[in-house]
Amino acid sequence: MARAKLDRIDRRILSDLQSNGRMTNVELAERAGISAPPCLRRVRALERAGIIKGYHAELSPEALGYSVSVFALVGLNSQAEADLKAFEELIAKWEEVRECHMLAGEADFLLKIVAETWDDYQKFLTTRLTSAPNVSHVKSMMVFRTAKEVPGVPISPDA
C-alpha cells in the first residue's frame, strides 16, 4: 500500500481521532482550524481511503473478568501459504485470541490471548491451540503488568 499524502489538517484530524474517537465533528473541526462541513468531508475521505479503519471503545479486561493476558509464540510444522492461511482462519474464530501476528524468525505467529483465569488459559492451550492442525509448538508468556499500551501509530500534526 502506498503511503498516503496527508496535509497538516489531515494529520491533526487523525491525531485527535486516534486519541479520542468520540470527539464531535464540531470539536474536531475547531481543533483542526476548519469549519465542520469540510472537516466531515475529510474524515469520510480518510475512511474511504482506509486510513481510518474503524472506531472502538477501549475496555478494561479486568473489569470484565479477564485477569489473564498471555502472549503465545506458535510454531507450525509447515509454512506453506495454504497452511498459514488455514491457521489464521482457525484462530479468527477463537474469541480468546485478540491479536495474531505472523512473524519471521523462531516462531511463525505471535498471539495475544485473554482468559478469565490461568486454568481457563491452560484449558484453551491444551484443548484447542496445541491440538490445532499443523501446530508444532507453543511457548506461552504470561503478562504480569502492562507499562504502556498505545493503539495506533505516532502522528505529528505539525510534521
Image (spheres, rainbow, N blue to C red):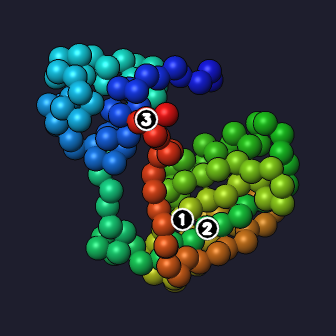
Residue 15 in picture, x, y percent from top left: 38, 40
Image quadrant where one finds the N terminus: top right
Q: Quadrant of residue 65?
A: bottom left
Which of the two residues, 1 or 76, is positioned nearer the viewer here? 1
> Few, some or many C-alpha atoms within 10 Å of disc 3 (few <14, some 14-19, many ≥20)?
few
- The residue to which callout 2 is attached is 71
- The residue to which callout 3 is attached is 158
- The structure residue drawn at horizontal position 46% and vertical position 40%, both measured from the top left corner, is 156
Q: Secondary structure at mark 1?
A: strand
State the mark number for residue 113: 1
Q: Quadrant of residue 60?
A: bottom left
Residue 140 in picture, x, y percent from top left: 67, 73
The amino acid sitting under disc 1 is Ile
The amino acid sitting under disc 3 is Asp
- The structure residue drawn at horizontal position 32% and vertical position 40%, both measured from the top left corner, is 17
Query: Mark 1 vs mark 2: which is more N-terminal?
Result: 2
